[in-house]
Amino acid sequence: MNKIKSLDDLRKMKQSLEHGMTIRENSNSPESLVQIRVAMATCGIAAGARTVMNTLIEKLEKEKIPAVVTQGGCMGYCYAEPTIEVKVPGKDPVVFGKVDSAVAEDIVVKYIKNGELIDGIIPVNYQSINEQK
Amino acid sequence: MNEISLHIIDIIQNSLSAGASLIRVVIEENIVQNLLSVAIIDNGKGMTKEQIDRLDDPFFTSRTTRRVGMGIPLFRQSAEQSGGELVVTSEPGYGTTVKASFLNDHIDRPPMGDIANTMVLMISSNPDKDFVFEYIYNGISYIFDTVEIKAVLEELSLNDPAVIRMLTEMISENIKDLKTQSD
C-alpha cells in the first residue's frame, strides 16, 4: 500500500475507509460514547501520559469500543500521575491514578468492557463528613 | 521530560488553558547552522509583562489545582543546557509565543521524540481547536494545517483511530521526505 503523503492521498484513504465501515453515526452524540480524559499537564506528561494515551486509543480500537480520548489539564493528583478520567455512558465519571500501559489495557477490558471495578480509583466523588446529608 | 516533543505537549496544554483556538508549532532544524528551534505560537489570552517576568518562578501558576508550575522552567533548562535559550513574548488579548532554541549537536540536547505521533495526539484530542504544524529542515518546509485536513475529512472524526494512523503517517512521511530531499 502506498504511504499517505498529500491531501489527495488522504482523500482517497477516506473514501476507502467509508466503503469499509459505517462511519460513526454516533460522533454527533458524544454522550453515547465512552469518554476518556488523559491529564496532560507537566506532571502527567513527565509520568508518561502520552504513552498511556497511545495505548488507550489502540486498545479501544482493538476491542471495538466507540470512544473519545481527549486531553485534560492537571486535576491536582500529581502524586498519582498519569491519571485518566473515564466516563462510561450512564455512569458517574471515575478517575484512575498511576495508569501505565498495562493498567490502561486493564481499564479498557475490565472496567469499560466488562464493568468490573479495578484498583487505582481516586475517589473524586468522595464526600467529606460535612457534605453528607 | 526527556524529549522535546514532551515539552511541546506541555506548552500546548498552557495554550489551551489560555483559551487558544489556533496553535502553531514551528520546528526548524538547520544542520549547517547547527541550530534546532521550536516555537509554539497561540492566540490565547496572552500575558502581561509582570506575568512573563514571573514565569520562571515555579510557584507562579494560574492553575488552582496545585500551587507549582514547572512547565516553562523545565523547557528553559533543556534549552539552556544545550547552549540555547528560551524566549517568551506575549501580548494580552492577542496571544503568546514560546520559542526555544538548541545547539543541534549539543550532547545535552534532548532527542525530538516521535513528533508526528505527538502532534496528531494533540490534534485528535482537541478536535475543536485548529493546529498548524510547520517543519523546516535546512530551509525547506512542510506545513500541516488542520483547517485543510478537516475540509478533506469532512464528517470523519479526528478521534478515529484509523484517522490518527493516517495523519501520523502523513506527517512522518513528509518529514522523512524533507530530510532526504535536502541530503
Image (cartoon, coloured by chain):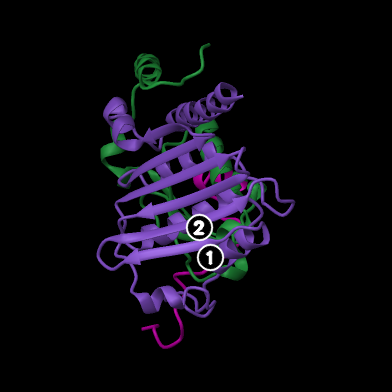
Chain colours: A green, B purple
- Per the image, is A55 magenta? no
Q: Report if residue A28 is visible in the image.
A: yes
SS category of the residue bearing label 2: helix
- Per the image, is A125 magenta? yes
Q: Is residue A51 above or below residue B49?
A: above
Q: Which residue is at a point 40% across and 38% down the rendered structure image?
A: B159
Q: Is residue B38 above or below residue B30?
A: below
The image quarter containing residue A30 is top left
Q: On the image, numbered disc 2 is attached to which residue?
A: B10
Instruction: Point out the stretch of residues depicted in magenta.
Output: A106-133
Q: Is residue A31 left or right of B103 when viewed as pictured?
A: left
The chain containing the residue under callout 1 comes to: B
The local crowd at label 1, few if under 14, some if 14 to 19, many if 20 or more residues have their Cα within 10 Å, is many
Q: Which residue is at a point 39% across and 84% down the rendered structure image?
A: A131
The image quarter containing residue B2 is bottom right
Image location of residue B35, percent across then percent down = 59, 46
Q: Amino acid at mark 1?
A: Gly
Q: On the image, numbered disc 1 is attached to which residue?
A: B71
Q: Amino acid at mark 2?
A: Asp
Q: Is residue B7 left or right of A20 when viewed as pictured?
A: right
Could you give the CA–CA distance between mark 1 and mark 2, rounded to whole angstroms? 6 Å
Q: Nearer the viewer, residue B66 or A33?
A: B66
The local crowd at label 2, few if under 14, some if 14 to 19, many if 20 or more residues have their Cα within 10 Å, is many
Q: Which residue is at a point 37% across and 62% down the rendered structure image?
A: B17
Image location of residue A40, percent across then percent down = 50, 57
Q: Earlier in the sequence, mark 1 or mark 2?
A: 2
User: Do the residues bearing badges 1 and 2 touch, measured as CB atoms within 8 Å?
Assistant: yes
Q: Report if residue B118 is visible in the image.
A: no
The chain containing the residue under callout 2 comes to: B
